[in-house]
Amino acid sequence: MDDYTWRMRLAARRRRRQRERLFVLALLVMAITAVFLYFSIYTKTPEYAMREMVEAYKAGDAETFRRHVDLDSITLQAYDDLTSDLFKYDMNLSDRERSLFENFYVLIRRQMCKGAVKVLNTYIDTREWTLPGEILKGRQLGIDYDLLLDRSLIRHTAFIDLEDVDHHGEEATATFSVVEEYSQVPFVLKVTLKNLANEGFNIGGSETEIFGKKIKFPGFTFNLGGSDWKIVRVDNYRGYLDAVSPILRKNLADYIDATEEIVYRYNRTFQAEQDNFISMQKSPYGIMFANQRVEVSNYITNTVIPTLESRQAELDEVPVPEGAQFLASLRQESTRVTIMAWQSYITGITENSATALDTAESLHKQELVLDQRIEEIVHNSAIARNLPELP
């Protein structure tokens, strides 16, 4: 090989190595740039926040999920949407009464939303639906909170996936596909996000006079502390209720019609049995004799409880539309609690047990609450029938 050819090969090899070094350097620069853009820009976008929230929800990461949702703001707006027609279908209310109830629900808005945040926080942490308790326990505000939660659809709405995120200025909108599990109605919820981070600084955005003319330079905002994109409002929650609630009301009405004859027939039987029960307890001294206790116990065991079981068996044979599942479950629970109350009463009178009688009384109170809730659903009544005094 001559000297010229050798030099040419060396030069070609140097150029190839130089290109390889440049290529590796370019890849390194691109990788560094990608990492920089990801951590300095993309991780501060609403798109990143929503995808992080979705992953946190699927993984049960309550802390991360809660970081991207402003529950206080969401519940205030959602409460207004939910209660806007709460008394629309209660035909027993006069216009004046309807106005009073609507104003009352405005007055208790703070307590109701505080309770909703507690319910949602508990679910986020445990994936279990509970009731808020405290002032919303029972009916201290004239509210059946369990029924209100059912009407909100929140407990039977299944999340499917994140659809899209649109960033515009200081706000962003995101859409999520969901499905209402009872009616199987699909829906796309639209939410508004805001960046609540306050550690930032601005460059530009001021007016400058040049050659006698005022020129405004564009401004740029830099966030020093990262982003804090949070969902602050569900924009079309009312639309979701309007899309699903009529279907559920139709399901409920069909089920009520299908069970009306059973309920009416057994109500007459229960009334007759109650009259017999009262008559059997009568005593000139106000205390049942031993033979009366045995007779009452046998009557409850052989007549009252079998009647309750027979009615529930007939109700269970009626197909339950998805929208009526809540009512069907309440009826089953009412039957179960009522039978337990009677059984405790039997123990109390046959064994002279004050503890069993106290248990029977407590269970009877639970039964009354369940029956009242059932009546409200069947008659489409307003959730609060009387206006209590606010604490």
Image (cartoon, rainbow, N blue to C red):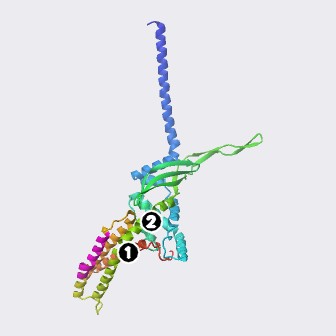
Mark pair 1, 2: CA separation: 18 Å
Quadrant location of residue 62? bottom left
The magenta stretch is: 298-315
* Vertical side of 136 occupied by 211: above or below: above
Q: Which mark is residue 339?
A: none
* Vertical side of 18 occupied by 80: above or below: below
Question: In what element is the residue under mark 1?
Answer: helix
Residue at 24% x, 87% y: name it.
292
Label the magenta part by its dominant secondary structure.
helix
Examine the rendering and report whether any part of residue 152 can be seen: no
Residue 246 in picture, x, y percent from top left: 46, 64
* Vertical side of 341 occupied by 20: above or below: above
Amino acid residing under circle 1: Asp
Q: Quadrant of the N terminus?
A: top left
Residue at 77% x, 39% y: name it.
211
Q: Is residue 120 left or right of residue 286?
A: right
* Vertical side of 293 occupied by 113: above or below: above
378 or 210: nearer the viewer:
378
Q: Which mark is residue 151?
A: 2
95 or 370: nearer the viewer:
95
**Location of mark 1 (residue):** 371
291 inside magenta stretch? no
Question: In what element is the residue under mark 2?
Answer: helix
Q: Is residue 300 left or right of residue 73?
A: left
Residue at 52% x, 39% y: name it.
37
311 inside magenta stretch? yes
